[in-house]
Structure formats: C-alpha cells, structure tokens
Image (cartoon, rainbow, N blue to C red):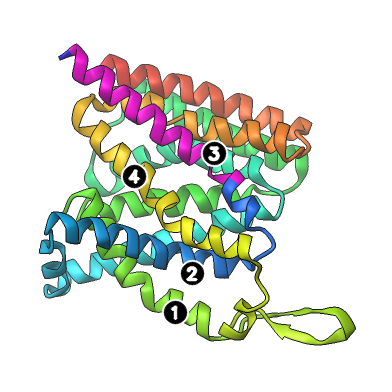
Amino acid sequence: MLKDFRKGAALAVLSYCIWGALPLFWKLLSAAAPLHILAFRIAGSLLFVGAILLFKKKYTFLRHFRERRERGYIICAALLVTFNWGLYIWTVNSGHAIWASFGYYINPLVSIVLGMVFFRERLSALQWAAFASATLGVIAHTALSGELPAVSLALALSFGAYGLVKKKIHVNSLEALGAETLAALPFALILLFFPFGAIMKDGGAEVLFGSLSGLAHYGTALWLGFLLAGPATAMPLILFSESARLIPLSSLGFIQFLSPSFTLLIGVFVFRENFQAEHFAAFSLVWLGVILYSISLFRKR
C-alpha cells in the first residue's frame, strides 16, 4: 500500500539521517577516551534494548546462547560490531570523518562481493561496474596521496563481514542487537576496569583514564552523553527494522547512502576537515559506483 510505503520510506530516511549525524554526538564526547565511549556504547545499548525486550516479554534470543554454533555466530558478530563501533568513534574524534563516510559509501559494494564469494550470489553487469568504479576510487586515492585508505577499508570490511555473520543468526534485528551487546559486555567491562593509558593533569599528576578511577575526572556533560550513547545507537536500528518491513530492498539500498552523505557534509562543513584532490578523485569514482549500484537495485526490483 502507498501509505505503508510512505511510512516505511520516512522511517528509513529518519534512521539513516540519525546514523549520518552521529559524528556530531561522538564529537561532543571527544574529551573522553574513545575506548571509554565504546564501553558505554555497548553497555548502554544492552540496557536500552534489554529494557524494550523485557517490556515486550521477548526472551527467546537467550536460547541461542545454548547452541554452540549459534553462540559462535553471536560472539563473532559481537566482536565485529565492537571493532567497527570503536574504529568509527576513533576515526570521527581524531578528525577523519571524511574517511568514515568513504568507508560507508563503499560498504554496500563490499557486501555484494562478499555475498558472491560466500553465498554464490550472482552479480549483474552494473554491479560489477559499480564495484570496479569503487576499486578505482581506492586506487586513485592511494596513487595521489601515497597512502592506502586503510581506515575506510577496515570500516567497510568489518561492517560487511558483520552483515555476513548476521545472516547466520536467526533472530530479528532488535533481539540480535540484545544478544550481540550481551556477548560484547565482558569486553566493555574490561575497558572500564583495566587501565589502557594515561593523561597528565595539572601539576604533572598522571591519571589512568582507562580505569574506573579515571571516570571520576569526566564532567557532568560527558556522563550525560555516556547515558545517551545506548539510545543513540539503538533508536536508528529500531526505525530501520520497521522500515525494512514496509518498503522493498531496492528503496532501502538507495536511501542508505544518506548516512555517509550526511557524515561527509558534517566532516567538511562542520568539522572543517580538508577535502583534498585525492579525496575528490576517490569520492567521484565511488559516487559513480553508488549510482550504478542504485540503478542495478531498481532494475532488479
């Protein structure tokens, strides 16, 4: 129905706009250690999603921990998403939001190749052309700057691999996030309890910021941000899950590029990151790949 499509499209646009604007939120927390932000993101997501699941009386996802095979997939997904979340936070807060957006532009193109390799999915000529264009974008950046965009590739590959593993977990998105954050909770606790670095305070006193004692040095604003990290992570996923039920994959495939577009605009115009010649060359080829990929989705539909 047209009404359902409009509702689904609106929810999808909202979810991807939130995802694209998240760099603004992580930047507000940049005074904190990136690994602390990651720890609170994991714990906060678990608490927020867990509360929703308890309210809805949905506990079936816990049964998947009893099966060794399913438990292995959940733990693998938890490790991949933890790595992806942590790298994304570090990338944005270290002044490289442009390359975070580049990673998520090429992510769908990486995913279709992973699908071909692991699920024997066949690529259309347009999809091959899209992947080739994105590959040329990476080569162009490497040739012009002398550096491989390693962070962008790591973001794209880790999230693509995460999506691959998710296909093996037979629970809905909300329950899957609950299971994954539960599996990742020990890692979050390690980040909170064990020191991993130090900062120098006034008078030369050394304070371990990767431990519980370091948390005392964070102000009220940071603590408020820590509390909001869970909802900020889970809300767009909830909106996305509802939109996926209402509109076709081809529409979602096109709308998803709103997220890296927002991140790119924020990086250039809000964070004032330098958009150089190698950026333009790489992004131009990737944007061509995005257009070809989107056309392939609509033609398939």
Residue 32 image offset from top left, x and y in percent: 65, 66
Q: Amino acid at mark 4?
A: Leu
Helix, strand or loop at label 3? It is helix
Instruction: Say if residue 1 shows up in the picture.
Output: yes
In this rendering, the answer to whether 20 lies above or below 60 is above
Q: Determine which residue is flagged by label 1.
A: 189
Helix, strand or loop at label 4? It is helix
Q: Quadrant of the N terminus?
A: top left
Q: Determine which residue is flagged by label 4.
A: 237
Q: How many marks?
A: 4
**N-terminal of the two: label 2 or label 1?**
2
Q: Quadrant of the C terminus?
A: top left
Q: Determine which residue is flagged by label 2.
A: 39
- Residue 17 on the magenta segment: yes
Q: Evaluate if marks 2 and 4 touch, with contact meaning CB atoms under 8 Å apart.
A: no
Residue at image coords 35%, 54%: 162
Residue 57 image offset from top left, x and y in percent: 11, 59
Q: Amino acid at mark 1?
A: Leu
- Image quadrant assignment for residue 247: top left
Q: Evaluate if marks 2 and 3 touch, with contact meaning CB atoms under 8 Å apart.
A: no
23 and 154: which is toward the camera:
23
Q: Which mark is residue 21?
A: 3
Residue 66 image offset from top left, x and y in percent: 12, 75
Q: Compute the Cα span from label 4 to label 3.
A: 14 Å
Q: Compute the Cα span from label 2 to label 1.
A: 7 Å
61 and 10: which is toward the camera:
10
Q: Compute the Cα span from label 2 to label 4.
A: 19 Å
Q: Is residue 259 left or right of residue 182?
A: right
Identify the main secondary structure in magenta. helix
**N-terminal of the two: label 2 or label 3?**
3
